Image: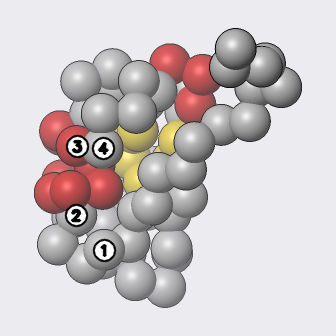
Amino acid sequence: MIFRDWCKACGICSAFCPKNVISMDQTGAPVIERPDDCIGCLFCELHCPDFAITIRERNTGKSVN
């Protein structure tokens, strides 16, 4: 989740994403292009200087038995 009001479009999230899930649009704002490719490494969240990104666990509907 990207908090647009907090984001200053610095591009750090895109630069640190090892799977290139985040790209920058023509205005410089981050866009989650391929959410299914996210590995949940939290690099984008940890490196964002404005705390504008939060990674949430996906609900896959699978049981964890």
- Ranked by sequence position, the earlier of labels 3 and 2 is 3
Q: Give the residue drawn at x 58%, y 31%.
A: 35
For marks 4 and 1, the one nearer the N-term is 4
Contact (Cβ within 8 Å) of mark 4 with mark 3: yes
Q: Return the disc, 3 or 1, that comes first in the chain's sequence.
A: 3
Q: Are marks 2 and 1 in contact (CB under 8 Å)?
A: yes
Q: CA distance from mark 2 to mark 1?
A: 5 Å
The extreme bottom residue here reads 5
Task: Return the mark for residue 48.
Answer: 2
The alpha-carbon separation of the residues under discs 3 and 1 comes to 12 Å
Q: Which amino acid type is shown beneath numbered disc 4?
A: Leu
- Vertical placement of residue 26 versus 19, above or below: below
What residue did someone put label 3 on? 43
Cα separation, mark 4 vs mark 1, equals: 12 Å
SS for callout 2? loop
Residue 56's place in the image compared with 7, above or below, is above
